[in-house]
Amino acid sequence: MTLEQITVPMSKQDAFALADAVMEEYGLALSASAFENADGDWVFEATCDQKPDVERFNALAKSLLKGKVEFSIQPVPDKDWVAHSLEGLSAIDTGEFFVHGSHDETPLPTGKIAIKIDAGQAFGTGHHETTTGCLQAISTVANSDTTPANILDLGTGSGILAIAAAKRFDQKILATDIDKKAIEVALENAKINDVADKIETAVSTGMDHPIFVEKGPFDLVLANILAGPLVELAPDIAKHTSEGAIVILAGLLTRQADNVIQAYETNKIALLERVEKGDWTILRLQREA
């Protein structure tokens, strides 16, 4: 995957505002941030997996900031940045799960379910607040009166949530993602964790793929993506879930949570619990009759 970065120096306040706005624009960038460089100047930076859409960046900047900005674009060196940044990270003990890399020799805590995930070219190693929050939510579901039999992991990334659900519930899982590479990674991780026979995958943008009708309706949906897509997918998730189904949503900033909740309540999926972890919120909801 070829990555490109788009940057522009600006005030700290403007850089953070633009970074937040970019992350709310579905498909505009993989990541966006504000940082202080070695000279003490603040810089906005976004990383894209294709040629940056400068027109959209300019439109966002114009709507937020005073004056014109001049973006710079440069390629990112060909390197597995996910693996590089996560090398040596320790194991994660969260909910009923113990997530570790192959390099980690920490003994498995008593009563925990082990998940082996190495850093790679797909989101989801267990270290991000949204992932740990989802694993905790899965544990909550597992210890409730609900016993899901038909499970969907929407935007599976590394497959970590599908693997957790397969191990905890011993049920078949449908794991989908917009990215073919993510599906390949998820399948490999499923094999490593001995649950490949329980996880079926599909490359799908949104929920238009016929497999959702074929395999649905679902009684547990896991979706750790972004706020924008979560809002857009609310009607489709409602369509493909059964009465009483549990829906776990993550990937949204806390300030975005109310909009996401409203979108789902409009589609008769009511909030059961919201959990804040850092700047992020994890939602557990239930499909009404």
Image (cartoon, rainbow, N blue to C red):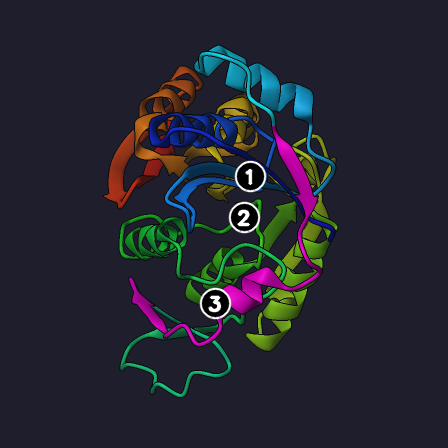
Q: Does 135 sit left or right of 83 as displayed?
A: left
| Residue at 45% in and 40% down | 33
* Mark nearer the N terminus (3 vs 2): 3
**Vertically, is 262 above or below 255?**
above
Q: Amino acid at mark 2?
A: Asp
Q: Nearer the viewer, residue 134 or 140?
A: 134
Inter-mark Cα distance, 2 to 1: 27 Å
Q: Amino acid at mark 1?
A: Ala
Checking the image for residue 86, the label placed there is 3
Q: Does 218 sit left or right of 274 as displayed?
A: right
**Vertically, is 208 above or below 182?**
above
Residue 275 can be seen, yes or no: yes
Residue pointed to by mark 1? 46
Q: x%, y% of residue 265? A: 37, 20
Q: Nearer the viewer, residue 239 or 283?
A: 283
Dot 2: element: strand
Q: Does 276 sit left or right of 77 as displayed?
A: left
Q: Nearer the viewer, residue 133 or 14?
A: 14
Q: x%, y% of residue 68? A: 55, 15
Q: Nearer the viewer, mark 2 or mark 1?
A: 1
Residue pointed to by mark 2? 153
Q: Nearer the viewer, mark 3 or mark 2?
A: 3
Q: Amino acid at mark 3?
A: Leu
**Vertically, is 44 above or below 90?**
above
User: Magenta stretch?
Assistant: 71-95
